[in-house]
Image (cartoon, rainbow, N blue to C red):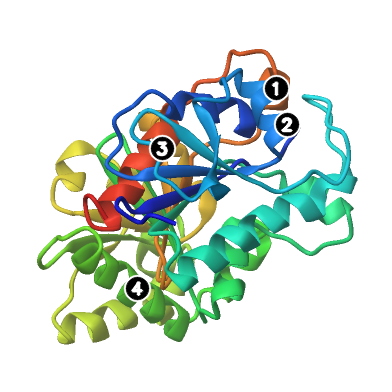
């Protein structure tokens, strides 16, 4: 197979959602890489409306040139009706991820981009699944990875991700927070090319604990870790009250925000960038980006889905993998 241009792979995600639909927007552009969409070929053709000369077979062993999207066929387990979830296709969704991960680890693909999956239907199929981020960590043997969303001029990373709110305080330990900050700082330098990045760190409690009157996590966990890492040369501000962290004059001081939990940081970012934001998994040995939205079952098969986030995710994956990869 010709490798004149690097290959970026896109998983088409939950087949009953908008993932297959939005892949059509990748065609017709002069990408500096080959784009390969993983999914059932029949499903992709029926939902994207792309002709055979535009959605071409990846196994053809030749670079089809710019403007084309290649399809790496993986068969569905069961027939799909747009908008209707089926547990029968849960293994298919994970097979897409496994093929993309294996290809990235082996060097076949320069980066992977993921369309949305539906965590609930995968769990309903009897497969423990809390999200792409955790799955990628397990499959690549990473002790810890970090979810970061970028968009609207913001970069927001998370200490905890898909946890019930009641479990968040005890999940944030000193070693875990220090590990998270080291990953964020490293990838801002190495992946994003930011020399000496400055990270704004949110507190966990209202008013960052108000000196211990509204919680002691800032005193007992967060501040000691920040002091330790500042001693290693990291540029860290915090712990900062989350309700005033996301104001322009504070954000201007930093290159990224570290929020303590999912719904502390992501509502602000999605307000600023929904439809154009990108999810990036930091700390992996491979490059992975994703859309910032869900499966939008109500839009599947209706040609009304906005592909802006997927396009931006591909653009960022190419950048993180080295420009032209």
Q: In which quarter of the image is residue 239?
A: bottom left
Task: Indicate which disc, 3 or 4, sits on the residue closer to the N terminus.
Answer: 3
Task: Indicate which disc, 3 or 2, sits on the residue closer to the N terminus.
Answer: 2
Image disc number at residue 46 = 1
Residues at discs 3 and 2 in contact (Cβ within 8 Å):
no
Q: How far apart are marks 1 and 3 (CA)?
A: 21 Å
Q: How far apart are marks 1 and 2 (CA)?
A: 6 Å
What residue sits 33% from the left and 81% below the top? Answer: 225
Q: Which residue matches tag 4?
A: 183
- Front position among marks 3 and 2: 3
Image disc number at residue 64 = 3
Task: Indicate which disc, 1 or 3, sits on the residue closer to the N terminus.
Answer: 1
Residues at discs 1 and 3 in contact (Cβ within 8 Å):
no
| Percent position of residue 252, x then y | 14, 45
Image disc number at residue 42 = 2
Residues at discs 1 and 2 in contact (Cβ within 8 Å):
yes
Q: Mark 2: which secondary structure?
A: helix
What residue sits 42% from the left and 79% below the top? Answer: 221
Q: Distance between the residues labelled 2 and 4?
A: 40 Å
């Amino acid at each position: 197979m010709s490798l004149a241009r690097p290959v970026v792979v896109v998983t088409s995600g939950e087949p009953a959602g908008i993932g297959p639909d939005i892949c059509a927007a990748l065609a017709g552009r002069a990408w500096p890489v080959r784009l390969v969409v993983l999914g059932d070929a029949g499903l992709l053709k029926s939902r994207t409306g792309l002709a055979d000369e535009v959605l071409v077979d990846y196994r053809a062993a030749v670079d089809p040139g710019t403007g084309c999207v290649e399809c790496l066929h993986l068969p569905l387990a069961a027939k799909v009706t747009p908008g209707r979830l089926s547990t029968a296709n849960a293994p298919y969704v994970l097979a897409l991820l496994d093929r993309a991960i294996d290809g990235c680890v082996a060097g076949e693909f320069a980066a992977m981009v993921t369309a949305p999956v539906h965590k609930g239907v995968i769990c309903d199929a009897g497969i423990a699944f809390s999200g792409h981020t955790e799955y990628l960590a397990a499959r690549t043997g990473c002790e810890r990875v970090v979810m970061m969303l970028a968009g609207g001029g913001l970069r927001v990373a998370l200490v905890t991700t898909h946890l019930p709110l009641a479990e968040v305080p005890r999940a944030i330990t000193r070693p875990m927070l220090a590990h998270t900050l080291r990953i964020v700082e490293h990838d801002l330098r190495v992946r994003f090319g930011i020399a000496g990045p400055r990270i704004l760190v949110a507190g966990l409690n209202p008013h960052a604990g108000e000196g211990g009157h509204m919680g002691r996590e800032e005193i007992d966990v967060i501040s000691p870790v920040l002091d330790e890492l500042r001693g290693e040369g990291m540029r860290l501000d915090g712990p900062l009250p989350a309700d005033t962290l996301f104001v322009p004059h504070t954000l201007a001081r930093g290159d990224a925000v570290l929020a303590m939990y999912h719904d502390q940081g992501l509502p602000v970012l999605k307000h600023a960038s929904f439809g154009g934001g990108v999810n990036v998994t930091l700390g992996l040995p491979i490059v992975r980006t994703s859309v910032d939205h869900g499966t939008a079952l109500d839009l599947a098969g209706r040609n009304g889905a906005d592909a802006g986030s997927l396009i931006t995710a591909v653009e960022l994956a190419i950048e993180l993998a080295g420009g032209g990869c």
